[in-house]
Image (spheres, grey):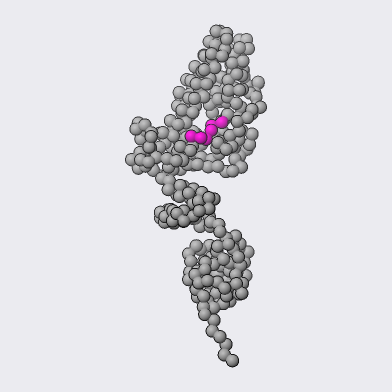
Amino acid sequence: MFGFFKKPKLVKLRSLDNNQKYGIAAASMKELLKKGCKTLQLRPAGCRVCLYEDGTEVTEDYFRNLHDNTELILLTKGQEWNGDIWDVSLLLGASSTHTDLLIESAKSLLSDENAPKRRKILQELIHNLSDNAEAENREDDKDWFEGINSRFKTKSAYMKYNGESRVRGYLKEVEDYTGSIKSPKVQGEYQKIVATMVKQLKTVKYNGCYFDRREKGDNRLCTPEGWFSCQGAFDADKCPSLHSINPYGNRESRILFSTWNLDHRIEKKRTIIPALAKAVQNQNGREINWEYFYSLLFTRENLKLVHIACHKKTFHNLECDGSKVYSKRKRC
């Protein structure tokens, strides 16, 4: 009796550390493992083959029922593959020369994808890969500057203005509180302190440096490339969701960044400004420690950059430090 000839199956095989697919013809799992290890330069001991699609391990019996061109992954001892996930390490390790190819591939997948979750992942991938964060000048990224006044010639200049605008907004709230003070004398003293703060803010250009990626590390809240990270809610040490954004990358990110908050840990309206007014009212010849209130209102001493999802719009229940309200220096 003659043995029957097993027709080889043609499969596409890759490893966990190499995303390149290799076409391999084999009539059995034993032959596939042998050829696969040789092609991928892996040691055979402990190796196994799984479906790339869902991570199902391929046994000898399973192998017999495989269709030609099935995508498989060869795993070495200790390696795991869950299937149907993105090989993030390979994606992050891709060189910039492959970015256009990744974008086109993602767009192609997106056109045929119906699952909402997978569509969102593909859209986010395309969005982030399509950024042009390296560009700084208006002529190099005209889309980014759409809707922005022509006086801004660079991204950093606009982002610096954005930071200044937020701090100016805080200043306006401090100034507007003057109307809530009934005593003209207290109003006058309050205005003097505000004027001193304005002078200091002008010196530091309203801390626009916080959003300017060209500034030195201690002065900015972003990386030199323009990446900002959420610092977590007022009562948290860090952001549990690891929110991050690069408003320098594209127009959409720039617009989304406007929803991030420079949040006051000790609250501005509820606590700091009323405390300042009360200190002026009760100073009785003492000198107000305006630098303390200034630091709480306008500096990173009390400000945290927070993603909108981490911004808690609740009473913070944090008070000013009473020992710092008045200066230890004698008033002239």
The picture places residue 25, in percent across and down from the top left corner, at 50, 75
* Quarter of the rendering containing residue 323: top right
* Residue 51: percent from left, percent from top: 57, 66
In depth, the one of 86 and 56 nearer the eye is 56
Q: Position of residue 266 (x, y in %)?
A: 61, 27
Task: Tell me how many marks there are.
Answer: 0
Q: Going by the picture, which residue comes out furthest to the left?
A: 139
The residue at the point 59 percent across, 13 percent down is 280
Q: Quadrant of the N terminus?
A: bottom right
| Quarter in which the C terminus is drawn | top right
Query: Which residue sits at x=40%, y=37%?
Result: 155
Residue closest to the eye, 226 or 312: 312
How far from the left and from the top, in percent, is residue 189?
A: 55, 11
Extreme-top residue of the structure:
184
Residue 127 visible, this orientation: yes
- Front-lying residue, 28 or 305: 28
Judge whether residue 121 can be spotted in this image: no
Q: Which residues are magenta?
A: 258-263
* 28, above or below 279, in the image: below
Q: Which quadrant of the figure has residue 215?
A: top left
Tell me the residue at 52%/66% (across/down): 71
Taking the image as shown, residue 290 lies to the left or right of residue 322, namely left
Q: Is residue 209 above or below residue 99?
A: above
Residue at image location 58% in from the left, 34% down from the top: 311
Query: Does 32 appear in magenta?
Result: no
Task: Give the vertical position of 134 relative to 261 (above or below).
Answer: below
Name the image quarter holding residue 184. Answer: top right
Q: Residue furthest front?
A: 114
